Image (cartoon, rainbow, N blue to C red):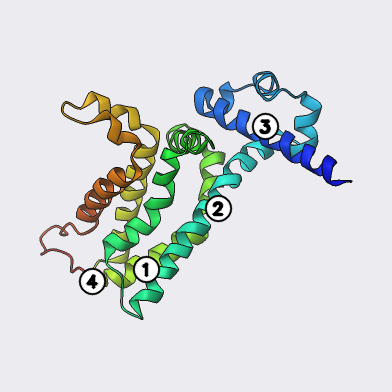
Amino acid sequence: MNLRAIKAVTETQTRILDAAEDLFMQHGFEGASMRMLTAQAGVNLAAVNYHFGSKDALIEAVFRRRLDAMNTERIAELERLEKDAAGKALSPEAIIRAFIGASLRMIEDTRGGGRTFTRLLGRAYTEPAKPIRQLIGQMYATAMERFKAAFVRALPELPKDELVWRLHFMFGTLAYTLAATDTVQLIAGAKPEDRYDARVLEDRLAAFMSAGLLAPLAGTVNVRIAA
């Protein structure tokens, strides 16, 4: 296959993935039909089947296209911070920022489809589609283990089962933030323009998550913060 043919295949795949990403976000994974997909992508069903094989494989490709890169970026940032710390435990807030920064920056990406994907990702956590949540969980597994280990070092006095629950709540908070940025308009006094400002969101979300992560256990004093 020559370079021109390879480029044409890549462009076709990209159109299909872009259309699928948008339609899944708007209509859900069940609601977005293959007829809608082929019409928006400007391809026929044979092209979709040729490149992806099935709707399930297409869904996986949609998530893998962005999540693999996002999680690689997260781990790279965590490793950079750990290297700079020279063996010392990181602060919980630094770990939080390393995790949430990559996904929040995608909210600002309107031309490349990043904002659409963040809305889709948030929707995936709220729709009753267990196979898709399991798929996303598998894609997150390596990154989550690395970040969990960093939190264990940063918060040695926090029981591990309690840490698991707090990470669960943190993850849910991030998912809701990605899925429901429009909700800020319902809150009196909020600036609607801030909902798509990654730095504003990161500062506020990191402060909120840190407070929850460091909240005292029932009947105890505050969890110790690593230096």
Residue visible at 49% across and 58% down? 73
**Image depth: mark 3 or mark 4 in front:** 3
Residue at figure coordinates x 27%, y 47% from the top left:
205
Pointer 1 residue: 150
Which mark is nearer the camera, 2 or 1? 2
The answer to whether one can see residue 128 in this image is: yes
Indicate the quadrant where residue 126 lies: top left
Image spot of residue 16 (x, y percent): 68, 31
Q: Which residue is mark 2?
A: 69
Judge depth for marks 3 and 1 and give the one in front: 3
55 lies above or below 73: above
Which of the two discs, 3 and 4, labels the residue nearer the N terminus?
3
The residue under the point 64% across, 35% down is 17
Horizontal relation, residue 215 to residue 76: left or right: left
Q: Is residue 138 something that shows in the picture?
A: no
| Relative to 109, 226 lies left or right | left
Give the residue at mark 4.
Answer: 226
Mark 2: few/some/many CA within 10 Å (<14, 14-19, 20+): few
Residue at which label 3 appears: 15
Query: Image quarter for residue 187?
Result: top left
User: CA separation, marks 4 and 2?
Assistant: 29 Å
Report the disc number at residue 78: none
